[in-house]
């Protein structure tokens, strides 16, 4: 089976999953966190080099404050429960997004996990937290303009522009998966997804399991990736 080097997942449907079971939306997010661990460990075992997960978008601040507060408590829950296992599996934690707006406790927990796993050489588990692709592209353009004005660079190419993005140093995204039946990208990695294969799954994120990922990989294997050629 062809294994993508870099898989990105929009983990959609936690709230709807909970509602369908007569539970609070927070219960769906709690189950979603457990599934992050399961899918990350499995992807690592398959030889995936990088797994990027859309954990919280710049638009998610519009949600009710109670839900936002709960979502910001989940890094503590996740890393308290699974950081030791991530270390044992040699998984490296990274993050993209604007960390400055993240509450202090969640920010410190993320930075601690990033520091503790920084020397790991296995799969990169990359969380997109307070991330928006349009915001990322604007910031990249501003950073280039600053360097240009300072005389540090004199031209811009597709390759050099990659260095200004938050995903600098990560492999190109081969496969994007979105769960819960929605078929849109939602301001996620707009530039990086230029030649990615897109797969939309019907099940909500808490129900997305190893068999679901295997099905995605089987479909990916049968895609013809021509990158504009024949």
Image (cartoon, rainbow, N blue to C red):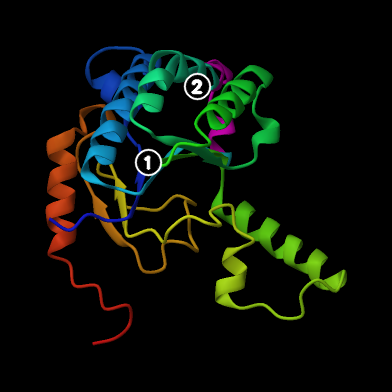
Q: Main secondary structure of the magenta part?
A: helix
Q: Is 77 rendered above or below residue 117?
A: above
- Say which quadrant the N terminus sits in: bottom left
Kind of element beneath mark 1: loop
Residue tagged 1? 122
- Hey, which quadrant is residue 120 in on the image? top left
Kind of element beneath mark 2: helix
Q: Is 23 rendered above or below residue 212?
A: above
Q: Write the residue at 18% across / 50% down.
A: 216
Residue tagged 2? 75
Q: Write the residue at 19% across / 72% down.
A: 224
Q: Which residues are magenta?
A: 59-70
Q: Magenta includes 60?
A: yes
Q: Write the residue at 81% across / 71% down.
A: 152
Crowding near the residue tagged with mark 2, few <14, some 14–19, many ≥20 C-alpha atoms within 10 Å: many
Which x, y percent locates residue 104? 68, 20
Q: Magenta includes 23?
A: no
Question: Position of 188 compared to 17: left or right?
Answer: right
| Furthest residue toward right | 150
Nearer to us in this view, 28 or 223? 223
For the residues labelled 1 and 2, the Cα–Cα distance comes to: 21 Å
**Looking at the rendered structure, which numbered label has been put on residue 157?**
none
């Amino acid at each position: 089976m062809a294994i993508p080097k870099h898989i990105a997942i929009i983990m959609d449907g936690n709230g709807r999953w909970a509602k369908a079971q007569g539970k609070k939306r927070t219960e769906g997010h709690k189950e979603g966190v457990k599934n992050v661990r399961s899918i990350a460990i499995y992807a690592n075992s398959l030889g995936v080099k990088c797994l990027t997960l859309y954990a919280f978008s710049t638009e998610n601040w519009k949600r009710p404050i109670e839900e936002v507060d709960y979502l910001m408590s989940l890094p503590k829950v996740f890393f308290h429960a699974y950081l030791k296992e991530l270390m044992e599996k040699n998984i490296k934690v990274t993050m993209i997004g604007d960390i400055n707006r993240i509450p202090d406790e969640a920010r410190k927990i993320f930075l601690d996990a990033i520091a503790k796993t920084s020397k790991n050489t296995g799969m990169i588990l990359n969380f997109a937290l307070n991330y928006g692709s349009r915001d990322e592209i604007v910031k990249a353009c501003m950073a280039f303009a600053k360097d240009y004005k300072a005389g540090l660079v004199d031209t811009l190419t597709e390759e050099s522009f990659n260095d200004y993005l938050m995903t600098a140093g990560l492999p190109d995204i081969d496969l994007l998966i979105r769960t819960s039946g929605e078929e849109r990208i939602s301001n996620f990695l707009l530039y990086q997804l230029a030649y990615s294969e897109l797969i939309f799954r019907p099940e909500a994120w808490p129900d997305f399991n190893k068999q679901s990922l295997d099905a995605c990989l089987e479909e990916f294997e049968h895609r013809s990736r021509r990158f504009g050629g024949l």
